[in-house]
Amino acid sequence: MRGIWWKLLTGLWMAATILAAYLKAGPAEGFPFPDGARIIFFHVPCAWFASLSYLLACGYGIAFLRTLGRQGWEIAQRWDLRTSVSMELGFLFAALTTVSGSIFSRLEWGAYWSWDPRQTSILVILLIFAAYLVLRGAVTDPETRARLSAVYALVAVVPGTFLIWVLPRIVYTLHGDANRAVIGGNIGNNYRTVLYAFALPAFIGLFTWMFQLRLRQEALVRRFHET
Amino acid sequence: MNNMAAVAAVPLIVWVGVFVFMLMVDRKLSRLEAVDREKDDL
């Protein structure tokens, strides 16, 4: 997306989200520390975009392998760039999800970490993202690196899907109650409005902008190395 | 209400800093891309 208008809008919308989280949304009903539940306006979108990054990386990985076979490395490397940026942002948002989730866990359930299935699964997802970055750093030949990265991104979607969407629904987790309270709509005080009308659009803009910045930076670096 | 406004000011100030930084990076990249395009034209 071109232009600066949508970036300024993202800035304003995120500021509005922060104000709404503290001034529009009231203390959460049913939580031991009602004011601490406001962290979900930042924790939940981070989790959503960590999951989205997984899927994006898988899609771009497929596009890379198909383009590599049909049109060659010169054309295919743009998809490798997108795969890499998706996984980098996924790592960042998974880290933010883990940290914000730990803070929420301390406030609401008394401990930063309790090896709850949801907490453990996000940690494993974070390690899967980290391993991708280690893999890219370990291979020096660009085409080999791109091939291995694309296959990794493809294969990683299997455990990622299981850990994000299946495991937390087949075992008991503290997080299940939080899901039902917040996203299920069992919580009042404007929480759903702030989450979906403020936080979600702000994070869509933020993720898109960060993706674009990293893409542009890496494209310039590759052009510099070519010349 | 006043206490909440004071608490909200902390992440708000952090966000303003992050936003300004990202905008500066964005503009810098735009300048570098413009220089790169001029080199191609030459």
Image (cartoon, coloured by chain):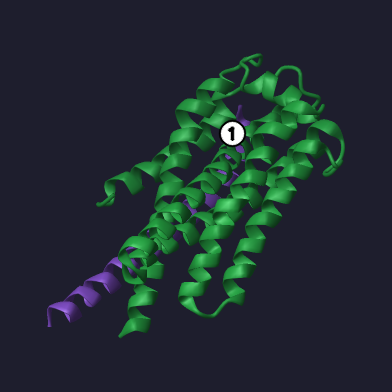
Q: Where is residue A172 in the image (x, y as percent from the top left)?
A: 82, 26
Front residue of B16/A146: it is A146
Q: Position of residue A37 (x, y in %)?
A: 69, 30
Vertically, is B8 above or below A196? below
Using residue A193 as the reference point, say whether residue A113 is left or right of it: right
Q: Chain A hue? A: green
Q: Position of residue A17 (x, y in %)?
A: 50, 35
- Quadrant (top left, top right, bottom left, bottom right) of the N terminus of chain B: top right
- Quadrant (top left, top right, bottom left, bottom right) of the C terminus of chain B: bottom left
Q: Mark 1 points at which residue?
A: A41
Residue A180 appears in the picture as rendered: yes
Amino acid of disc 1: Phe
Q: How many numbered circles are shown?
A: 1
Q: Quadrant of residue A151?
A: bottom right
Q: Chain B hue? A: purple
Using residue A31 as the reference point, say whether residue A162 is left or right of it: left
Residue A14 appears in the picture as rendered: no
Q: Which residue lies furthest to the front in this view?
A: A69
Q: Position of residue A143 (x, y in %)?
A: 46, 73
Q: Which residue is drawn at 56% across and 38% down?
A: A48
Front residue of A115/A169: it is A169
Vertically, is A167 above or below A189? below
Name the secondary structure under disc 1: helix
Q: Quadrant of residue B22?
A: bottom left
Q: Residue furthest bottom?
A: A227
Q: Which residue is drawn at 70% across and 56% down?
A: A127
Label 1 lies in what chain? Answer: A
Q: Which residue is drawn at 59% across and 47% down?
A: A157
Vertically, is B14 above or below A142? above
Within 10 Å of disc 1 (Cα), the crowding (few <14, some 14-19, many 20+) is: many
Q: In which quarter of the image is residue A65?
A: bottom left
